[in-house]
Amino acid sequence: MGIMKKIALYPGTFDPITNGHFDIIERALNLFDEVIVAVALSADKKPMYMLDERIVMVKAALMGLKNVTVVGFDNLTVELAKSNNATVLIRGLRAVSDFEYELQLGYLNNSLDEEIETVYLMPKLQHAFISSSIVRNLLKFNAKTEHLVPKEVQKIIAEKKSCILQ
């Protein structure tokens, strides 16, 4: 029997994907054989971008990376992990304020599937303040966001904005 690949799942809404998310994905790729970026439908969060748009953005941002795949999902994260042979969930921690929620989520996921481990990764300090909600707020006010999102994503956001304005 061959050596099993260590597959990690990085779930999130990615509305839109930020440089912080990208940083976490790069770090995860240094630790695991494969990373699956799972874009959640998250209808309850009322995302700014539709699921298919977010998947396109994530794929565009990750184009240059190897051993990473992007999927959309609307089921329990642990079910998605199991169906993709992922035994590790990746979660990003920016600040202490994220910790309590993420810890609770980690315990919940482990209670649903004892084989699932959650690994918490911190983005580089220069990305620690970035969140998708900050980016969305800036976009509402037509403020600059190119320093917060991958350039491929900025291009998609700009194209979408110009389509809306026409």
Image (cartoon, grey):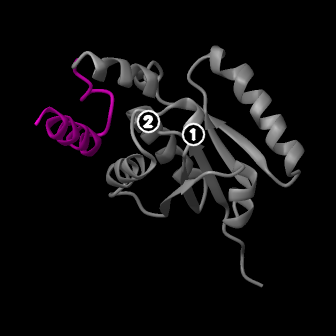
Residue 131 visible in rendering: no
Residue matched to label 2:
15
Residue 130 visible in rendering: yes
| Viewer-side residue, 30 vs 56 | 56
Tell me the chief SS of the magenta region. helix
Any magenta on residue 162?
A: yes
For the point 25% across and 45% down, which residue is it? 152
Whether label 1 touches label 2, CB < 8 Å = yes
Q: Which tag, 1 or 2, sits closer to the chain's start?
A: 2
Q: Secondary structure at mark 1?
A: loop
Question: Which image quadrant: the C terminus?
Answer: top left
- Which mark is nearer the camera, 1 or 2? 1
* Highlighted magenta segment, given as a residue range: 143-166
Which amino acid does the dot numbered 2 rest on? Asp
Q: Where is residue 5 shown, x and y percent of the image?
A: 66, 68
Question: Where on the picture, by quarter, is residue 96?
Answer: top right
Left or right relative to 36: residue 113: right
Any magenta on residue 149?
A: yes
Q: Residues within 10 Å of mark 2 (few under 14, many from 20)?
A: many
Left or right relative to 154: residue 31: right
Residue 151, numbered circle: none
For the point 33% across and 57% down, which residue is it? 64
